[in-house]
Image (cartoon, rainbow, N blue to C red):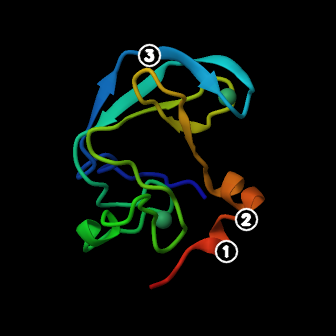
Amino acid sequence: MLFFGKKDKGAGQPIHPLVGRRAFCRICDSDQMFTKCWRRAAMVRQCTGCGAAFENSGQLYQSFQPQCPHCAEFLEQPGFDYGMCDTCGSKFELPDGAKPGLLPNKEQRQRMGIFGQIRNK
Ligand SMILES: [Zn+2]
Ligand SMILES: [Zn+2]
């Protein structure tokens, strides 16, 4: 499940680190500190979940909620802010002045049955 020794981790996935903030974590069901926050600057070209490279990210991004065609990982969208809950490690989209939206990880997706809903064209 973990990728070791990937020296180029982050290459081709341009993100701008942001100052941490407090936000509501729906998994913890309370306000939590999000120390790790970032803004995505460009389309995801390599899956943050399974590491698959996308040859045509543009096509994936035509969908309202782009997902990895291999593992159904939700892809971060350019210009959006994201953060990781310090307490449970869940990833959220952190829109200014709105409720954070969960980007479920693999385990969470399986629990929610999201994987089965992915359309393979
Ligand atoms: Zn993937
Ligand atoms: Zn949490």
Q: Which residue is mark 1?
A: 116
Residue sitting at 40 percent across and 59 percent down? 64
In which quarter of the view is residue 112 placed?
bottom right
Q: Which residue is mark 3?
A: 20
- Residue at disc 1, secondary structure: helix
Give the crowd class for mark 1: few <14, some 14-19, many >=20 residues within 10 Å. few
In this rendering, position of residue 39 left or right of residue 92: left
- Of mark 1 and mark 3, the one earlier in the sequence is 3
Rounded to the nearest angstrom, the CA distance separating label 2 from label 1 is 6 Å
Residue 62 in the image: state x and y as whole percent: 30, 66
Quarter of the image with the C terminus is: bottom left
**In which quarter of the view is residue 1 placed?**
bottom right
**SS under mark 2:** loop
Q: Residue at x 47, y 14 (%)?
A: 21
Amino acid type, mark 2? Gly
Q: Which residue is mark 2?
A: 113
